[in-house]
Image: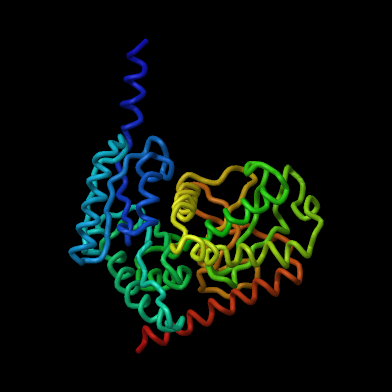
């Protein structure tokens, strides 16, 4: 009877809306991400959302953001219960349940990595401090803007009221790239490939590991018995995929980044499927892999009840240990540099 369908539609709307803040929201990743969030793909098909869109307090940028708001009105998403556009971070973060930090200072020609760290230290120190005072205490923060791991570390350290486990950085894009390339190489469907791992930094030192991956239920290394392909082609391809896309499009990845952000938040909030793990850059403290404590380092994780857990006790061979150490060292250097900048 028709009354049933009416009942269902009111049921789906009975959840209270969550406030989702996106920083750098006027950029191309933000534009690609909004349909995921507003259609229920990210936080669930029955979860209403209120968007807080933050970008620079510059007239042209705010005008652009106003145009995005018009499009969101015109897209008539049933789950979208409100849109706030602002150039003020305190307004954007107030009461936020999820914050997706796309905004960061972009690396310009001739900039040293230290210059980039310095610019971003200022941004993430300020934003971490604001999150600390005005966001929900259970806020989930995902940092995407590069250098993402270290930007995330700064924000977390400047927000002592928010548990460290509530901060993460995006390595799901690298993870998805690895899954995609394994599927292509083995002529499999995406559903038949699982448990690739990205270890470490979201940079070209990251270590894409297929030693524990499965293809059609078998170990990936058995299906692809070709170490030269793995070390000589696959690893560098995943490490440098972002640069290859910039070279081809003259723009950084947006469509794929948005999908990865949506996947990351979806799994963190709603859980990972049984037997599957994904990659998230999270607080390394207490890990069982010999990685130094106090870093934001990408690990294999499972998620349940809104919390991530690092997958324990995977056997790690010498090749992997070396690669994991290289990316750990880079993160340690970035941390040391930022600590010097923050003290100055």
Q: Quadrant of the C terminus?
A: bottom left
Query: On the image, which quarter does residue 23 sit in?
Result: bottom left
Residue 263: image x %, image y %? 49, 49
Quarter residue 3 falls in: top left
Q: Is residue 20 rendered to the left or right of residue 332?
A: left
What kind of colouring is applied to the model shown? rainbow
Residue reaching furthest bottom? 344
Left or right: 191 in relation to 248: right
**The N terminus: image quadrant:** top left
Q: Position of residue 277 (x, y in %)?
A: 61, 51
Residue at x-position 57% and y-position 63%: 241
Q: Nearer the viewer, residue 83 or 73?
A: 73
Residue placed furthest toward the left: 59
Total tally of numbered discs in the picture: 0
The answer to whether 45 is drawn above or below residue 51 in the figure is above
The answer to whether 148 appears left or right of 324 in the picture is: left
Q: Nearer the viewer, residue 311 or 3?
A: 3
Residue at coordinates 53% horizontally, 76% vertically from top-left?
331
117 sits left or right of 331 in the view? left
Horizontal and vertical percent position of residue 325: 64, 75
Residue at 28%, 36% in the rendered image: 76
Residue at 27% x, 53% y: name it. 52
User: Horizontal and vertical percent for residue 270?
Assistant: 47, 44
Taking depth in this image into account, of 16 and 44 the one nearest to the observer is: 44
């Amino acid at each position: 009877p028709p009354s049933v369908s009416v009942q269902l539609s009111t049921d789906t709307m009975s959840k209270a809306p969550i406030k989702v803040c996106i920083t750098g929201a006027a950029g191309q990743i933000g534009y690609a991400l909004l349909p995921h969030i507003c259609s229920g793909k990210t936080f669930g098909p029955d979860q209403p959302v209120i968007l807080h869109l933050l970008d620079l307090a510059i007239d042209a940028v705010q005008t652009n953001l106003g145009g995005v708001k018009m499009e969101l009105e015109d897209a008539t998403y049933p789950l979208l219960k409100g849109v706030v556009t602002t150039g003020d971070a305190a307004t954007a973060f107030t009461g936020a349940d999820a914050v997706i930090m796309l905004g960061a200072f972009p690396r310009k020609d001739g900039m040293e990595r230290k210059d980039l760290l310095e610019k971003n230290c200022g941004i993430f120190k300020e934003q971490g401090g604001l999150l600390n005072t005005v966001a929900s205490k259970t806020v989930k923060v995902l940092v995407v803007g590069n250098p993402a791991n270290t930007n995330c570390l700064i924000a977390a350290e400047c927000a002592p009221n928010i548990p460290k486990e509530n901060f993460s950085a995006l390595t799901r894009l690298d993870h998805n790239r690895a899954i995609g390339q394994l599927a292509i190489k083995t002529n499999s469907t995406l559903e038949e490939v699982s448990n690739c791992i990205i270890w470490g930094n979201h940079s070209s030192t990251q270590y894409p590991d297929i030693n524990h991956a499965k293809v059609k239920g078998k170990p990936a290394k058995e299906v692809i018995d070709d170490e030269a392909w793995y070390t000589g082609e696959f690893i560098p391809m995943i490490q440098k995929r972002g640069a290859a896309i910039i070279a081809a499009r003259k723009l950084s990845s947006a469509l794929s980044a948005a999908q990865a952000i949506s996947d990351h938040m979806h799994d963190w909030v709603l859980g990972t499927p049984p037997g599957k793990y994904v990659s998230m850059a999270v607080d390394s403290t207490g890990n069982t892999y010999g990685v130094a404590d106090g870093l934001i380092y990408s690990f294999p994780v499972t998620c349940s009840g809104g919390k991530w857990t690092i997958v324990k006790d995977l056997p790690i061979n010498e090749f992997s240990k070396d690669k994991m150490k290289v990316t750990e060292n880079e993160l340690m250097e970035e941390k040391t540099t930022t600590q010097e900048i923050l003290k100055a």
